[in-house]
Image: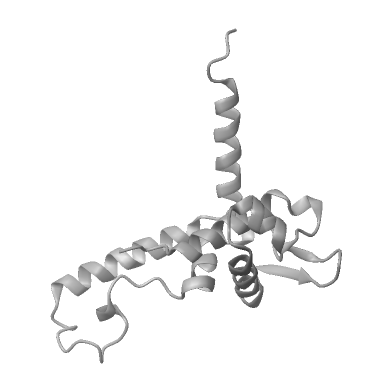
C-alpha cells in the first residue's frame, strides 16, 4: 500500500522546486518538469490541480509560469497530498458508517481511526518551509563532510 502515490510524489517535488525558486518569480511548467524529473504532460496536469487547490498561482503568456500562492509556512504537506489524491484514508471502513455493519463494535477500526488521525495531524504539521529548510541544512552538512581542517 502506498500512502503517497507516485503522482503525489511528483507534485511534492514540484512544490519543493517552486519553493526554492519562489524569489525568482514565475517558473515554467517545462522547467518544473525537467528539474523535478517529471514527465512534461503530467507536470502540467499536476500544476493545474495544485492551482485549482489554490496552492499555486499561474500566469499565462510567453513569460508566464507558476509560483506559490502563499508563503512556505502556510502550505502544509496534507494540503498538497489532498489536492492530488484526495483525503488520506487508511481503510474503506473509515469512509462512512454505511460501508461496514461492524463499525460500532470493531476494535480494529478504532485503532485504524487513531492511526489515520495521527498521520493526518502529522502531515498537517509539516509545512513546505520545514521541508525546504531541512533539505538546505542537509546540503550544508554534506558540504562540510570530508573536508580537512
Quarter of the image with the N terminus in it: bottom left
| 11 to 21, vertically: above or below | below
Number of disc labels: 0
Q: Is residue 84 above or below residue 127?
A: below
**Residue 29: x %, y % from top left:** 70, 63
Tell me which residue sits at (86%, 67%) in the image.
Answer: 62
Judged from this view, the residue extending furthest toward the bottom is 98
Q: Is residue 76 visible?
A: no
- Nearer to us in this view, 102 or 140: 140
State the image coordinates of residue 149 (x, y, percent, origin top left): 60, 7
Residue 34 versus residue 65: which sits nearer the camera?
A: 34
Query: Is there any visible trace of residue 30 in the rendered image?
Result: yes
Extreme-top residue of the structure = 149
**Quadrant of the rendered structure where residue 95 is?**
bottom left
Residue at image location 57% in from the left, 8% down from the top: 148
Residue 1 as seen in the image, left or right of residue 37? left
Work out whether 12 lies above or below 98.
above
User: Where's residue 107, x and y in %?
Assistant: 14, 72
In the rendered view, does 142 fall on the left or right side of 22?
left
Residue depicted at x 60% and y 43%: 133
Q: Is residue 31 left or right of residue 89?
A: right
Q: Residue furthest right?
A: 62
Name which quarter of the figure residue 58 lies in.
bottom right
Color theme of the render = one colour
Image x and y of residue 39, in percent: 59, 62
Residue in view at x 55 percent, y 58 percent: 12
Return the residue nearer the eye: 31 or 137: 31
Amino acid at each position: 500500500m502506498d500512502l503517497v502515490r507516485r503522482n503525489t510524489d511528483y507534485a511534492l517535488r514540484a512544490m519543493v522546486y517552486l519553493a526554492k525558486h519562489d524569489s525568482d518569480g514565475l517558473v515554467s511548467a517545462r522547467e518544473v518538469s525537467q528539474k523535478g524529473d517529471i514527465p512534461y504532460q503530467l507536470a502540467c496536469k499536476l500544476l493545474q490541480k495544485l492551482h485549482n487547490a489554490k496552492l499555486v498561482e499561474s500566469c499565462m503568456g510567453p513569460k508566464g509560469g507558476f509560483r506559490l500562492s502563499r508563503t512556505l509556512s502556510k502550505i502544509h504537506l496534507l494540503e498538497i497530498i489532498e489536492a492530488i489524491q484526495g483525503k488520506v484514508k487508511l481503510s474503506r471502513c473509515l469512509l462512512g458508517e454505511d460501508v461496514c455493519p461492524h463499525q460500532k463494535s470493531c476494535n480494529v477500526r478504532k485503532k485504524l481511526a487513531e492511526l489515520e488521525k495521527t498521520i493526518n495531524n502529522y502531515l498537517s504539521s509539516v509545512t513546505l518551509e520545514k521541508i525546504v529548510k531541512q533539505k538546505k541544512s542537509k546540503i550544508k552538512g554534506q558540504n562540510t563532510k570530508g573536508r580537512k581542517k
